[in-house]
Image (cartoon, coloured by chain):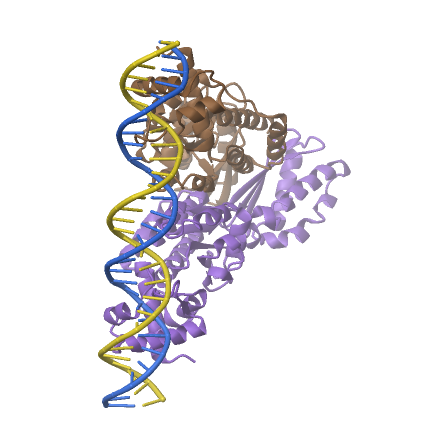
Chain colours: A brown, B purple, C yellow, D blue
DNA sequence: TGCTGGCACTCGTATCGGATGAGTGCCAGG
DNA sequence: CCTGGCACTCATCCGATACGAGTGCCAGCA
């Protein structure tokens, strides 16, 4: 077990390294933090910390930098979540309040988060399956061509084009719309499939194929793999690190361009609390020198989606966690209002 | 006026430089291209080309690289548009055909374009003002809370929430919907404002404020500044150049993150033909060492939006132009079908 | 007039070596 | 268990040198 002081040394190393981006030595440590012991003592502590795998030195004559394990300990035991200043909070609220629709909310959120944390921000749209149905609309663009519009209580709107096997009359369409909405409005999308399974049975024999196709399309939009949407922003912030990461920026950018990777990244986050994945804890190779801070957000108690940031393992964890948490809360509020 | 051979030398320099990314010297030129003259002759031609400002040498003992003016001449006079291989064309078609909605079309297009050109792709959504109205839907989420849904002939769907001053009955809403659609369906969005200006007059006095707000919101969605949407992809491709562009990648990424800059970038493109803006021809400082190849696309003869790529001035212009043009055509076809 | 071979020259890049200094590990003493 | 001292390791920073690609110019030739 590590003594109190050694933990203090680790904390000091993490803080200094995050600030200066340079390996930190024993002398500098004792000077900048009032540790009350000599460099030699700190050196011993460092050697111990290195034995335990919390820090390591890039080369023999260099200072120490935290390992992933070191950051993990720092995040779990040594650091809190730094609350935002009231100015920052006001800025968040002002910035998010002007949004006109969900796209706008997500767009503003991602820009805001990127700017606050100076890192890459990732925001997932409220997932359909965790939202409730506000309305299902059916529009006849042509006699046998229907547009299906799904509207969720979180403001998300999805549309699909459907080619029907037979023309649908206006009355039929109105009928389908009414019965469909009667069954599903207010329900959670995840519960929808069984609720509509027998819907075609209530219609004339000739109309059933059209109704079935319509329902099939509705259910298709709910498939988890395809329904998720994600917005990314602040990729330019990656260039802030490339002076000592020239090799790593490329795979990171490539990873971030893949929707699936992003989804998994957020998906791994714990549903309720905030999740921090550090370096090699990330499943994706390209992201081995990055950390992900993510948290769920929602209009009520329950999370409807997640958001977070991706940055170098050498990031300001307390500050980032504070910003991510604060933004998630405000977004939840905005969603609840709309 | 430049002699035939000097133009040939310029073309050879551009081609070699694009291929090798290194300044090209007289000896290498004569060897790799069958110019039929000696290096010394080429040197004289190079000196002349340099006097005219088409090429320049980074330092005394280095080869030549084309200037923006040189690329301009190359694009205008020396290079054609390289058509895609039939395999590439098939790939485009296959890739775009699976799209389920407009977001999907745009998303696939941007990925496709980035992959084909190995550069950063930019695709603008069909602009509302250049599209026609397919349908306007009004949904009552609550008695005094209306959702306005606009659907264009290009498949774009916009929604806005409206808080009405007074509750609107279902019949009133249906009435507004019917009259509104009667006036605007099939019309171009740009023509909509005068068509609906007197619409509130036809309603009961008490209902007019609600109808007016509704119309106001409809017109707001058409404001050019805010209605435009853009998708960007392939930013990871920027890292391909950073070995000799370490300084420039940052401002480029920052520029690309600004919606307004992107819009201007595409907006400057000529409406009909393909536009190539080279280096300093771009208004934005950060993009001074990049070129933009853009072209309009649309379901019919007329462009409804633009798409293009952003890459280093040292790019394969014929190939890029071929890919951009081909993709624009296929996207136009897809839109026409939907 | 225009092309060519030759030649001196420039200058960026790569290589090597030594000096510098930050930082360490270890040890003896308090 | 802490501390001061000391020898040692290396990464980094010049400065000098060699190298070589590429040029400009010139005299000669078709």
- In depth, the one of B37 and A259 nearer the eye is B37
- In depth, the one of B84 and B301 nearer the eye is B84
Residue A292, relative to residue B16: is it above or below?
above
Image quarter of residue B323: bottom left
Residue B56, relative to residue B45: is it above or below?
above
Coordinates of residue A52 in the picture (x, y in percent): 31, 18
Give the residue at x 39% y 61%. Answer: B321
- In depth, the one of A265 and B200 nearer the eye is A265
Coordinates of residue A306 in the picture (x, y in percent): 46, 27
Image quarter of residue C13: bottom left
* The N terminus of chain B - image quarter: bottom left
Residue A204 in sight here: no
Outermost right residue: B205
Coordinates of residue B92 in the picture (x, y in percent): 33, 52
Residue B220 in sight here: yes
Coordinates of residue A110 in the picture (x, y in percent): 51, 35
Give the residue at x 46% y 60%. Answer: B279
């Amino acid at each position: 077990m590590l003594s109190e002081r050694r933990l203090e040394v680790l904390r000091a190393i993490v803080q200094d390294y995050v600030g200066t981006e340079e390996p930190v030595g024993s002398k500098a440590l004792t000077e900048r933090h009032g540790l009350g012991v000599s460099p030699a003592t700190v050196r011993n502590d460092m050697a111990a910390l290195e034995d335990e795998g919390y820090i390591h030195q890039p080369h023999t004559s260099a200072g120490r930098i935290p390992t992933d394990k070191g950051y993990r300990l720092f995040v779990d035991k040594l650091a809190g979540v730094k609350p935002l200043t009231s100015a920052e909070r006001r800025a968040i609220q002002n910035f998010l309040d002007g949004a006109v629709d969900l796209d706008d909310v997500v767009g503003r959120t991602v820009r805001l988060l990127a700017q606050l944390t100076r890192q890459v921000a990732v925001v997932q749209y409220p997932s359909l399956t965790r939202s409730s149905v506000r309305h299902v609309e059916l529009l006849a663009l042509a006699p046998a061509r229907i547009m299906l519009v799904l509207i969720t209580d979180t403001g998300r709107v999805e549309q699909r084009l459907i080619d029907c096997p037979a023309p649908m009359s206006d009355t039929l369409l109105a009928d389908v719309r009414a019965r469909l909405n009667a069954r599903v409005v207010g329900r959670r999308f995840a519960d929808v499939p069984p609720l509509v399974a027998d819907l075609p049975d209530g219609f004339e024999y000739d109309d059933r194929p059209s109704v079935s196709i319509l329902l099939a399309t509705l259910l298709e939009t709910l498939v988890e793999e395809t329904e998720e949407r994600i917005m990314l922003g602040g990729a330019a912030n990656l260039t802030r690190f490339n002076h000592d990461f020239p090799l790593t920026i490329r795979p990171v950018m490539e990873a971030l361009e893949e929707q699936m990777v992003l989804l998994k990244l957020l998906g791994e986050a714990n549903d309720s609390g905030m999740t921090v994945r550090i370096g090699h804890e990330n499943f994706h190779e390209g992201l081995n020198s990055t950390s992900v801070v993510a948290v769920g957000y929602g209009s009520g108690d329950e999370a409807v989606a997640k958001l977070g940031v991706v940055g170098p393992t050498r990031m300001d964890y307390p500050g980032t966690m504070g910003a991510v948490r604060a933004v998630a809360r405000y977004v939840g509020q905005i969603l609840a209002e709309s």
